[in-house]
Image (cartoon, grey):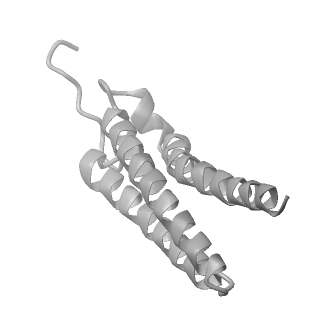
């Protein structure tokens, strides 16, 4: 009887990890589309590098999220509260968002006009 509660608790921890790993990069991507709407409405294939960056960050966050969830459960089973692991995961997510923003600005540079191919 006691093990069914552990499975539910693992599910309740894993679900926010998965949603956070996918929702945060997608949210940053949508913010770029909203803030720089003129840049993404003009040009040829603007936003494609941002999509690939977002996809890579999502995959990395998902893998690291499972790693941090496992560390959390090892800490919980070891008698610790696991708050330190949660804090490390939040710092990791914040640094991932910062890396995504920097890569988007470096690769696409939405502050200048988008490049147009020669056939336009």
Among all residues in the image, which is located at the extreme left? 118
Task: Tell me which corner region of the image, top left, top right, bottom left or bottom right, holds residue 84.
Answer: bottom right
Q: Is residue 2 above or below residue 52?
A: below
Task: Tell me which corner region of the image, top left, top right, bottom left or bottom right, holds residue 115.
Answer: top left
Q: Is residue 25 above or below residue 113?
A: below
Q: Is residue 22 above or below residue 97?
A: above
The answer to whether residue 87 is left or right of residue 47 is right
Q: Is residue 79 above or below residue 17?
A: below
Query: Residue 105's spot in the image, x, y percent?
Result: 33, 54
The answer to whether residue 99 is left or right of residue 9 is left
User: Which of these two is toward me, 7 or 101?
Assistant: 7
User: Which of these two is toward me, 42 or 95?
Assistant: 95
Query: Residue 22's spot in the image, x, y percent?
Result: 54, 47
Query: Residue 56's spot in the image, x, y percent?
Result: 35, 46
User: Which of these two is toward me, 65 or 103?
Assistant: 65
User: Which of these two is toward me, 53 or 71?
Assistant: 71
Query: Residue 111's spot in the image, x, y percent?
Result: 35, 50
Task: Tell me what residue is drawn at x 17 percent, y 12 percent.
Answer: 119
The answer to whether residue 116 is left or right of residue 98 is left
Task: Tell me what residue is drawn at x 56 percent, y 78 percent.
Answer: 85
Task: Tell me what residue is drawn at x 67 percent, y 51 percent.
Answer: 15
């Amino acid at each position: 009887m006691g093990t069914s509660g552990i499975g539910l608790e693992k599910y309740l921890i894993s679900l926010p990890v998965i949603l956070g790993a996918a929702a945060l990069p997608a949210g940053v991507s949508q913010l770029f589309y909203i803030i720089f709407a003129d840049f993404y409405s003009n040009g040829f294939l603007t936003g494609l590098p941002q999509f690939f960056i977002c996809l890579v960050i999502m995959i990395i966050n998902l893998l690291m999220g499972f790693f941090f969830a496992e560390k959390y459960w090892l800490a919980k089973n070891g008698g610790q509260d696991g708050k330190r692991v949660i804090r490390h995961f939040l710092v990791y997510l914040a640094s991932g968002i910062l890396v995504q923003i920097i890569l988007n600005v470096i690769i696409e540079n939405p502050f200048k006009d988008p490049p147009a191919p020669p056939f336009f």
